[in-house]
Amino acid sequence: METTQIEPADVSNHHYSYAANLLVNENKSAYETQIKLTEQGLSSEVAALIVENLEIEIQEAKYEKARKDMVYGALWFCGGTILTFADIGFIFWGAILFGGIQFFKGVINVNS
């Protein structure tokens, strides 16, 4: 009979995945997530470290998405404006409006 050994990296990945699911999908607070991790058998220091690292990663991901919204919004807005002023017979109000909304959505999310 063969025994299965669990690698420490697998255990660590499990705890990170569990904590990320609690923070992102279930909208639990950092404190609640830390309590759930300690209930899983982790020390409070390790649980706090996992939650802190995940919060940093989540903030970085939100910032990157907001930055991309600003870039693509500006491109749509500028492209629509340039094509409208190029006088090719069309007004690209959809691109201008969409780009403006997307740009300001990014600006708001970067500052929050």
Image (tube, helix red, strand yellow):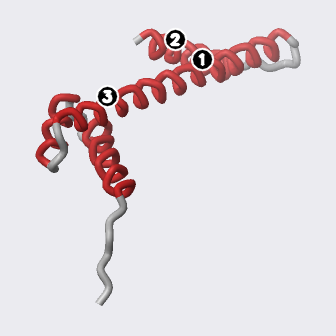
As shown in the figure, which amino acid type bears the numbered disc 2?
Answer: Val
Residue 45 disc label = none
Residue 17, percent across and down?
34, 48
Q: Nearer the viewer, residue 99 or 6?
A: 6
Residue 84, percent across and down?
79, 14
As shown in the figure, which amino acid type bears the numbered disc 1?
Answer: Met
How packed is label 2: few (under 14 Cα within 10 Å), some, or many (20 or more)? some
How packed is label 3: few (under 14 Cα within 10 Å), some, or many (20 or more)? some
As shown in the figure, which amino acid type bears the numbered disc 3?
Answer: Glu
* Element type at mark 3: helix
In this rendering, the answer to whether 72 lies above or below 5 is above
Q: Tag 2 or tag 1, which sits nearer the N-term?
A: 1
* Element type at mark 1: helix
Q: Nearer the viewer, residue 31 or 105?
A: 31
In this rendering, the answer to whether 77 lies above or below 37 is above
Specify the quadrant of the image occupied by residue 56: top left
Residue 70 disc label = 1
In this rendering, the answer to whether 60 lies above or below 39 is above
Q: Residue at x 69, y 21 (%)?
A: 76
How packed is label 1: few (under 14 Cα within 10 Å), some, or many (20 or more)? many
Q: Residue at x 32, y 70 (%)?
A: 5
Residue 66, percent across and down?
52, 21
Pointer 2 residue? 107
Closer to the observer: label 3 or label 1?
3
